[in-house]
Image (cartoon, rainbow, N blue to C red):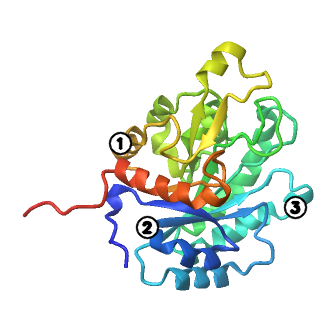
Amino acid sequence: MNQPVNTNLIRIGTLLGGKDAPRIIPQVIDYGFESFELTFWQTTGGLDLFELAKRVREAIGDRDIVISGLGVFGNVLTGHGDNADALASWERCIDAAPAFGTDLVAGFTGRIVDQPINASIPRFRQVFGELSRRAADNGVRLAFENCDMGGTWERGDWNIAHNPTAWEMMFDAVPADNLGLEWEPCHQMVSLIDPIPQLRRWAPRIFHVHGKDATIAWDIVREKGIHGPDEFVWHRTPGFGDSNWRDIITILRQHQYPGTIDIEGFHDPVYRDELEWTGQVSGLHYLKACRGGDFVLNPR
């Protein structure tokens, strides 16, 4: 059995595809992950989430491991095409979250396609005003992933929650205490935003953290800018990127952060394919070291 976790240290875990979680958990459970966020791309499909929760609990057994949240990643503001079930999937996850032992549902906000972020705010107010009330009735919080999905302020397909100016607009539109952010430094670094001052400012609104970092090639930025053919930034597994996660965890603890840090894998350009879980387990050990290692009782 893995060592019990003192939750004041912040649990370190990873993301798993919700549908595959009962199959994957037994294969990775001995690596030392302390939490899992279960994710769904655009739809929960025909899954019985309450049955899935039962199977996940059985896979975890008596281990001191938690389900940190459920994630739905689709465009709930349009519901077009493959996103037709995205809104209903948020509703199902909100209703089923307590069965998984979590109070968190996260994902993209959605977006009015190829329109400026401002144009999405009225629809955001309508959709997430209703979802926030449904979530509150279930004791659930909602958090927005900060990935731009290739979008900008002017155009995009998926998500408006990738810029702090948009966050101000969103939380002004729906001033609900159970709305917050699913934050990671990587997505801000892709926009050349320094994540540390941003984290100090927004920590009270952060409900969940994805363990994903970035490497910025500043020599390319200085020589060729960001609009040429040369890549200037790469998503990285924690421990292989530019961020000091000791600083990140320190700031989170200074603000009494109540959540977990779950590694978002399958993005690192080096630790991928047959090295995927080598990288993830390395990131797990790195993040545990950054939080101070394992919990140690004080002398009495």
Q: Are marks 1 and 3 in contact (CB under 8 Å)?
A: no
Between discs 1 and 3, the one toward the N terminus: 3
Q: Is residue 88 left or right of residue 218?
A: right
* Residue 187 placement: quadrant: top right
Q: Residue 21, image x and y in percent?
A: 63, 74
Element class at badge 3: loop
Q: Decide: few, some or many residues near mark 1? Use Cα within 10 Å; few <14, some 14-19, many ≥20.
A: some
| Amino acid of disc 3 | Ala
| Amino acid of disc 1 | Thr
Q: Is residue 271 left or right of residue 4?
A: right
Looking at the image, which residue is at 80% across and 77% down? Answer: 46
Pointer 3: what residue? Answer: 84
Q: Residue 64, image x and y in percent?
A: 40, 74
Which residue extends farthest left? 300
| Vertical arrangement, residue 4 with respect to residue 265, above or below | below
Q: Quadrant of the C terminus?
A: bottom left
Pointer 2: what residue? Answer: 32
